[in-house]
Image (cartoon, rainbow, N blue to C red):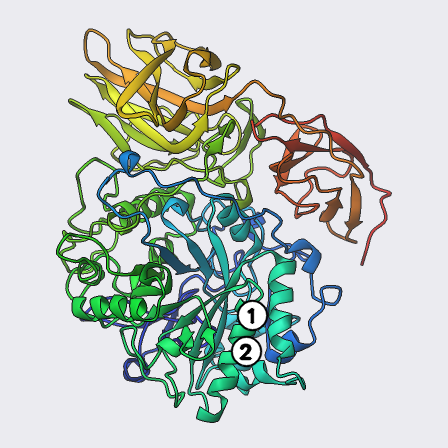
Amino acid sequence: MRLSSGDHAGRASARTRHRKWLRSGLAAVLSMATLAALAAPASATDTMPWGGQYADTSHPEQSAGANQPYQHGYTGLDILNWNPDADKDSEYLRSRVPLQTRIAANAATQKDPNLPADTEMFNLAGDYGNAFFESFHDNSVFSQYLFNYWQYTDYYGTWHGQPTANVPKSLYDEKAQSDWTQKWFEFGTLNLPNAAYTNVAHKNGAKSIATIFYSGNDRGEQTYKDLLQGKRADGTYPVADKLVEIAKYYGFDGYFVNQESSVNSADVPAYQDFMKQIIDQGIYIQWYDSATYPNGGVSYQNMFNDANSPWVQDPNKGKISDSIFLNYWFSGNMLQDSADHAKSLGIDPKYAVFAGIEAGQKKFGSIASNANYMNVNLDADGKPYVSLAALGTDFVSHELGDDKKVYPKYQNQVFDRERRLWTGSSTGEKGTTDISDPYIDDGTSSDSWKGFASQIAERSVIGGPVFSTSFNTGHGLEWRDNGEQTSNQQWGNINLQDILPTWQWWIDADSDPLQADFDYGKKYEAAPRFNYTKVGGYEGGDSLVLSGKLSSDNTVRLYKTDLSVAAGSKVELTYNKLNSDDSKLQLGLIFADDTKTIVPVDMADGGASNGWKTATVDLSQYAGKKIATLGLIVKAGANPIDNYQVNIGKITVTDGAAYTPAAPTNFQVERAYANSDELTVKWDLADYSTAKNYLLYLDNTFLGGRYDDTLYVKHLPAKTGTLKLYAVGADGSRSLAAEAPLNEERPCLA
């Protein structure tokens, strides 16, 4: 995956007749030969910091805080000498959510029951916005990119360059220099994942992957030899152990190794041993189809064969890495041969071989397109030969351009494009695919793009006796608690993203299916096809809204589950219905022992709720069963309802046990900064089985949150008051508040 500087700094636009370099957070996936042919000037997209030329100028608070912790890059020497006490901002940039276990596959409840559940997806993409200095946990920005399709993702690799620690931001100020792309020496060869993205990946059962990148011309003097330095007398490598230590400290799961400069043939065995030392300690590695075996030269094979398989499975040494990301120019025969080669080595092709898709370059076009690449992965029975890997899926956000992507009013376009990329339909309508990109006309037809979901079966972690969601997507234009606004500031914090609906969307109706959307409140501009009244969230930034003409019963499948029903089980549904009619709102349950039957359970009649209202239903009659699908039924009345709308603010399934955590202990202000309204707080972290998140307030104003033992606050709305910290349980309930006084005499740090 050949790039310009910064792992990501050049991204080739996917126009067949027009290509230009985009200075962006993700690079195009190109061969060296192709890259050499594309010598066009750079133009800015999303690598520059918020608050400057590319920010929403109506919201200056989007700029980074002067002391805001952000993740940086690492050279080989940095890795060799790494220790957490000396690493800049390390205590604020850890992921603390443990990797959750996904429930067993159940083909009968998949949208496509014939789809094999063992095909995996490696998603290599940027996080929030990819600015070099802004790999934050969170920021005051609604328009940052937040990934929403974890149910189709097994591995998420953060893909963008990061300057090393203490590199001054001024070096990348357009006014201060002519060509930042020449500052290659400033970038680390190792980029760690954004800790917030790791947290939400783990919450959804996906692994989080760092990147190691070498090429011939954009890491200065850094080469793969830095990884092999200091070889011990016992033949082991100290940098390998440090990479294991770094992964465990920061809480991520593995490394994507993109070795795109030649390896000296004499060093090939050592490089293998180096990687084996890492994977033998339980750290995942995916190798890119670049340097070959045994001569070490870069030669893209576009298939799994004898020239690259020893980087995954060596006939003498055994397992070297977990998998390979194949370069992009393959045919169906090549993928079939790749699967056969993996089997000949005794390894599972679905686990070990990933066919690369150039999402960020080719987007939705079907001429020499991703759609064709996807299609050739299918055998005569429509089953994938190997797994899939995509580079650049965040193009759905960044390619709106600087004139749109930073503004909240254009985010509905991002949501539609991302839905289309993953499901095949921007609207989520059953059985539809989009013919052209409604926001970027690339001059090509795209009727063959069926979405990654056409080959990747949906996954879920929702099992056991309890589940709760407020449909929080992880960003908003305000924050609400119990339907009341507790912050009027926009925000982006993927740490606070709930487990989102498994399907966007799966709505069955005989006629006039309702439309589904996430409602972010009165400030939100929804896509033009919607005409609902903006209500906003019940808890967090948004709610789920179902709206449109109601002329027949609508069954809305929401979550793939393996929820156990006990004698004390119940469901609480918080909803907001503005108008009265003769419809009904029901649960739609599919039980594991009869997946062909949807069981309706009455929740609410069609009367107006007069604000948010919570209905509760007893499930004890189903004790001993397993809920395999959790959904809703909007039951139509006697006559069509032209402007039906209901907002779903929260759904909670419990078994009647107590899940409210204890109040946090040892909560205190850790540090405040001179001439600033920034501070950090800390507390004792409870086990994830007890507390799923923490939320911080100043009096009754929401400040932020995440599952951690520390939190940075960029902007205090007042100089005095009481800081309040709540722990959130598995059923969505909150602990009593731990309190700490905020006063103007608090000790400050310069």
Q: Quadrant of the N terminus?
A: bottom left
Decide if residue 192 is in sight here. yes
Pointer 2 residue: 274
Vertical order, 104 against 303 (above or below): above
Vertical order, 254 against 450 (above or below): below
Answer with the quarter of the image where residue 623 lies. top left
| Relative depth, front residue between 655 and 633 | 655
Q: Quadrant of the C terminus?
A: bottom right
- Residue located 66% across and 33% down the image: 727
The residue tagged with tag 2: helix, strand or loop? helix
* Left or right, residue 131 beside residue 401: right
- Residue located 47% across and 64% down the image: 47
Q: Amino acid at mark 2?
A: Phe
Say few, some or many: other residues with alpha carbon within 10 Å of mark 1 (under 14 / 14 to 19 / 20 or more): many
Q: Amino acid at mark 1?
A: Ile
CA separation in Å, label 2 and label 1? 7 Å
The residue tagged with tag 1: helix, strand or loop? helix
| Relative depth, front residue between 532 and 628 | 628
Pointer 1 residue: 278
Discs 2, 1 touching: Cβ within 8 Å: yes
> Residue 88: where, in percent of width, then height?
69, 65
Decide if residue 219 is in sight here. no
Say few, some or many: other residues with alpha carbon within 10 Å of mark 2 (under 14 / 14 to 19 / 20 or more): many
Vertical order, 520 against 246 (above or below): above
- Residue located 44% across and 14% down the image: 619
> Residue 85: where, in percent of width, then height?
75, 64
Vertical order, 352 against 181 (above or below): above
- Residue located 81% across and 55% down the image: 749
Say the numbered circle drawn on residue 658.
none
> Residue 30: where, in percent of width, then height?
31, 75
